[in-house]
Image: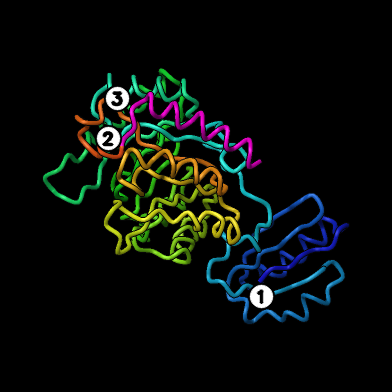
Amino acid sequence: MIAVLKNGTTKPQMDHLIDWLSKQNISVHISKGDSYTVLGLIGDTAKIDIDLIQSLEIVESVKRVSEPYKQVNRKFHPENSVIDVSGVKIGDGSLNFIAGPCSVESEEQIIGIAKQVKDSGATMLRGGAFKPRTSPYDFQGLKGEGLKLLFEARKVTGLPIVTEIMNINTLDLFEDVDFIQVGARNMQNFDLLKELGKTKKPILLKRGLANTIKEFLMSAEYIMSEGNENVVLCERGIRTYETATRNTLDLSAVPMLKKLTHLPVIVDPSHATGISWMVEPMALAATACGADGIMVEVHNDPPHALCDGAQSLTPEQFDSVAKKAFKIKEVVD
């Protein structure tokens, strides 16, 4: 349920209403704009008399929210959320590039790539320390050592780091990570999502490879329901009957998510297509349809990469993509 308060409502009046609702075991999410205040009522609102709330002098309108996701719902929070990742703003109208290798392989590799993508306009550095792989025989990442190398790359370049967490047991290792990524395979690892919700860390939540938009938003709701509102959504392709690409990039999800939620939305064309030459057109298309950021895999030597070399761009190719995307951003704005 949401209640829109009238202009001129005083803080004591609002606090009085919130206090009454709290006594009904209803928690309240407050969203303030320039000319409105929206109270999002969370809990068993079926027992709340909607006519009673509507009759209050300070209330402009009241309506029930039918969608199961509440806190991620734009009805609860009409304005776009802006997520701060160690000084980098996502959702403020700018276009952010998150770039770097699929896996951290060495100090020379990660620092070299970090310097190059920063020079090309990247605002964050991605790199896998813990790698989920389909085959148990594939490279699984450097784990804790990989995190240390990412921290070193951040020290050298100043770029906030983005890296994936695999399970709750390693959460303490991510204390100094700027932006914790939840991969597609863990999108519905609800225990992990709830633990991340108890932190205040920005969370990059990737859509599962076979999940609907509703399921995607419900996973974000798990994080936010625990108190962490710093969530960014990532469309990374879904599995369909098509085999020409690794996945099918659902760009229609970007405007749909923008309609349904206030959370920022970014796109990962690398994992979506699995083909390096397709990354550029999909990154440009994602920019044109309103994505807040693009996540791109960049490797200094893709043919010899330990992970996902086929979908990785060289630093020179990334530079070209970034330049074109920024020009498209200017046009669509």
Magenta-colored span: 312-333
Residue 22 image offset from top left, x and y in percent: 66, 67
For marks 1 and 3 on the same chain, the one whose residue lies earlier in the sequence = 1
Amino acid on which disc 2 is placed: Ser
Residues at marks 1 and 3 touching, judged by CB atoms closer than 8 Å: no
Q: Quadrant of residue 3?
A: bottom right
Q: Residue at x 17, y 39 (%)?
A: 139
Residues at marks 2 and 3 touching, judged by CB atoms closer than 8 Å: no
Quadrant containing the C terminus in the rendered view: top right
- Residue 300's label in the rendered image is 3
Amino acid on which disc 1 is placed: Arg
Q: Residue at x 56, y 38 (%)?
A: 84
Vertical placement of 13 versus 104: above or below? below
The nearer-to-camera label among 2 and 3 is 3
Helix, strand or loop at disc 3?
Answer: loop
**Magenta region, main secondary structure:** helix
Front residue of this view, candidates 71 and 301: 301
Q: Residue at x 76, y 58 (%)?
A: 37
- Residue 64's label in the rendered image is 1
- Residue 103's label in the rendered image is 2
For marks 2 and 3 on the same chain, the one whose residue lies earlier in the sequence = 2
- Between the residue at mark 1 and the residue at mark 2, the CA separation in whole angstroms equals 46 Å
